[in-house]
Image (spheres, helix red, strand yellow):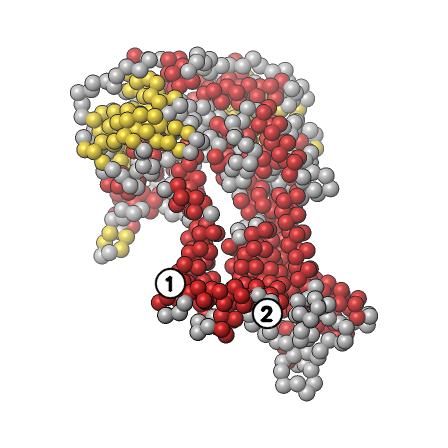
Amino acid sequence: MTPPPPADMREAAVELRGITKRFPGTLANDAVDLTVSRGEIHALMGENGAGKSTLMSVLYGMERPDAGTVHVDGREVTFSDPGDAMAAGLGMVHQSFKLFDSLTVAENVVYAAEPRRFGLVDRGAARRRVRELAEEHGLAVDPDALVGDLPVGLRQRVEILKLLHRGARTLILDEPTAVLTPAEADALFAVLKSLAAQGRTVILVTHKLREVLEGSDNVTVLRDGRVVARLVTAETSAADIAAAMTGRAVELDRVHASGTPGATVLDVTDLATDGVRGVQLAVRAGEIVGIAGVAGNGQSELVEALAGLRPVTAGRVALLGDDITHASATERRARGLAYVPEDRHAVGTAPAASVADNLAMGHHRTSLSSRGLLPPTAVRGHAQRLIERFGIKASSPEVPASSLSGGNLQKLLIGRELAHDAPLLLVEQPTRGVDIGAVQNIHDQLIAYRDAGHAVLLVSAELSEIRGLADRVLVMYEGRVTASYDKAEADERTLGLAMAGGPAPTEVRD
Amino acid sequence: MHRIKAVVASPVAFSVLAGVVIGALFLVGTGADPVAAYEAVITGSLGADGIGSTLTTLTSVLGLALALAVPLRAGLINLGGDGQLVLGGMAAAVTGLYSPLPAPLTVVLSLLAGMAAGAGYAALAAVCENRFGVPLLVSSLLLSYPAASFASYLARYPLKEPGSSLPQTRQLPDGVALATFGSSTVTVGLLLVVVAAAAYWFTDRRTAFGYEMRMTGLNARFSAYAGVERKGLTLRLMAVSGALAGLVGAIGVLSFPYRFLDGSLTASGYTWTGLTAALLAAASPVGTVLASFFFAVLQVGGLSMERTTEVPRELTQVLQAIVIVFLAARLRFPQWWFNRRKEAV
C-alpha cells in the first residue's frame, strides 16, 4: 500500500521529512514524508482528523513539529510564523477565508503589501494590479466590489489573487471546492493548471475524489496521522483513494430510492426577498426537494426567508396550511420547522459553548424545560442521547463544540435539528467539509427522516448529493427558480446547464 | 511549555499574579518593603478593624458588578451604571421622605422604588437601541449624564435640606434605614446583594432564560437562528441591570448618612470597579463575586496601607490597572487558540 516516494527528477518545491506532531491525547502526524515537485498539482487527501491540516500548519509555520524537517526549494527552513512561510514563497487559502468584508477586493488583495506612492497607498495602482492579475490568470472579479457583498466563489478568487500579488510560488488550498459548483470548480482547476504550467506548485488539501482525479498529478493519502498511500493520479481510481482514506471499501455517489410523497407541507407562492424574486415551490411530506444552483444565486436568502431570519418582501409562505409569511423564527419553529444552516460555525453553533449546550438549543424551551427551569441533568441527558443516536464523537458532553471535527460538528447540528421531529426540515450544504464516512451517515439520516414522513428542502452545491437524495430538483439562477426536474431527468449535464443560466429544457412546474 | 500553557489557560490567575508581582517591583523600586505593604493591605481589609469597611464596600462593588455582569453575559455592555445608581438613590430618598407608610414598609418601598427607577432608566437605553438603532454602549452612557444632573438639581433646589450648606436632602425619618449588623456599618443591604448574586447564579445555570443569555453572549447569530428574540432579551437584561444599579443606590441612601447627598454615590467610582470586576470574571456569577471581593479588599486595604506604611494607596490602583491590562490582552488569545487546536482533536 505504501510505495516509496516517487523518485521524481524535477526539483522538489516542498519536502517534508519525518514530520511528527503530537497534541495532548492525539498523535496528529506520525513520521509523515511528503514531497511535492515544482510545477505539480499535488492532492493531500484524508478524512477529517487524518492530520492534513496539522501537516499544512507545520508547513505554513503555524505549528512547530515535534520531529522532522521542512525543505522549501531544496533548503531546510524553520518557520516561526506564517509570515516566514510567505517570505519563502508559500501561500495558503484557508477554508474559512481571511478577508475584510468591509473593504474592497483591491484593498483586500494588496493588504500588507500595498503599492505606495509618496508613502500613501496608491489605490489606482492597486486596482490596476488586481485587474492585471485577474486577467492574466482568468480570475475575473470587480476590484471595487466590497468583499462582504461577494458570493463565496468570488471570495475565493480574492484569496488566490492575494497570494499571487505577493508572489507565492507554492499555493496551498484547504478544501478549495467545498463551496463551489462543478462549473466553478472546473474554472478553479483551469486556473490552477495554468499556474502549474507557469512553474507554480499547488498543494490541494481535500477529500473530494472527483476533482482530485481530474485536477491533480499525484495524491498522498493520510489516515490516522500516517501516510497510507502515495498514488499517481493517472494510475488510480476513486475507489482506490476512498479505500485508502477510510481503510475499507465504500460505496460512492449512492442514489437513494425515491420517497412516497403525501400532503403538501411547505407551500411558497411568489416569494420575494433580497436577491430572490417570484419563487414558487412546494415540498410534500415524505419528499426531499433539492435546490441546485451556483452559490450566490439566492439559495441562502431563500432559505433564510423561509426560516424567518430575513424579511419577506412579497408573496406567501404556508406551513401545513397556515400562513407563516411574517412569522418570527420562534413561531415557525413552534409550528414545525427545523433548520440546518449553511454556516455551522457562525450560525449553527456557538463553538465556545459545550457540546451539551449546543445540542440543547431549540429544545431548551420545549422538551428540556418546565416552567422556565432548565435542569443541567436534562441538558446533559439530552446530549448523551443525541451523541449516541447520531454517533457524534465527543469525549464528553462538556467539551467545547470547537473541539469537534467538522464532520462531528455537522452531525451535532443535524442531530439536534432532526431531534425536533419537525414536519419540515430546511437543510443547507449538509455535507460541506465533511468526510466520506460521515457523508454516508448524514445522507442515510436524511433519507430515514424523509421516509418517516417528513418534508425536506435541501440546498446543496454538490450535484452528486442533490442527485442522490432529492426526489425533485429545482434550479435557482439569479434569484429565481428557473427549472424543475424529476429525479430521473436530473442528470449532471442538464443540471449543470440550467445552473449556468442556460436554456431550461422543461418549463417550471407547480 | 506545558506550564506556560496552563497559566495562559487561566488568564485570571495569571493577571492577578502579574499585578501582584509588578506591584511588588514598584514597591521595591521606591524603596518600600513589599511584604510589609501587602501585609498592611491584607490586615487592613480583612482584620478585625477593616472587615466591616470591606463588607460595606463589597455591598456596592458587588451590586454594581452584578448590574454590569447581567447584560455582559449576553454580550451587552451597560455603561450607564452611574445614572441608574443615582436615580435609584434619589427615588429611594424621595420615597423614604414622603411615604406615609410605617417605617419598615417604607424601607421596603424605598428599595423597590430605587430598583424601579434604575430599571426604567436602563430600559430606556435598551429602547433607544431596539427602536432607533442607537448602540447600547452609546445610549446607556449618554443617558447617564442627564440622570446624574437631574438628581443633582433635585438635591440642590426642590429637595434641598433647608439651612444646609451641602447639596443634600433632609435626613430620612427615624427608622427609615436598613438594619445593621451589630455596631458595624454593614447593613442588610449586603444580604440583598448576596441574594441577588445567588439569583444570578441560579438563572445563569438553571433556567432557560439564563441559557439564552449565555448562548447569545457566546454567539448572537446562533441564538437568533434558533429563535431567541434579541430585542426582548436586551430589554429584559437591561431592566434587570438597571434594577440592580438602582438597588445599590437605594442601599446607599438607606445607610449612613441616611439621605441623598449629591455626588456621594458616584464619588468612589464603584460603577467602574464593578465593570472591571464583571469583565475580569467574564460575567460568570461565581467569578463576579470573587472579583468584587478582590477589588473591595484592594480598595479598603489600600487606605489602610497608606495609614500604616509610607506607601500611597495609589499602589492598589496600579495593581488594578495592571490586572486590567493583562486581562484586556487575554481577549486576543482564545480565537487563535481554537484555530490551532481544531484539527488535532
Residues at marks 1 and 2 on the same chain: yes
Q: Picture coordinates of residue A279 (x, y %)? A: 56, 31
* Amino acid type at mark 1: Leu
Q: Quadrant of the C terminus of chain A?
A: top right
- Give the residue at x 25% y 37%: A78
- Considering every residue shown, the one lying at the far bottom of the view is B163
- Give the residue at x 66% y 70%: B185
Q: Alpha carbon of mark 1 to alpha carbon of mark 2: how far?
A: 28 Å
Q: Quadrant of the N terminus of chain A?
A: top left
- Give the residue at x 66% y 47%: B202
* Amino acid type at mark 2: Asp
Q: Picture coordinates of residue B212 (x, y %)? A: 61, 44
Q: Is label 1 in a helix, a strand or a loop? A: helix
Left or right for B49, reference A404: right
Q: Is residue A304 visible?
A: no
- In the picture of the structure, the residue carrying the numbered disc 1 is B25
- In the picture of the structure, the residue carrying the numbered disc 2 is B49
Image: B159 above or below A456: below
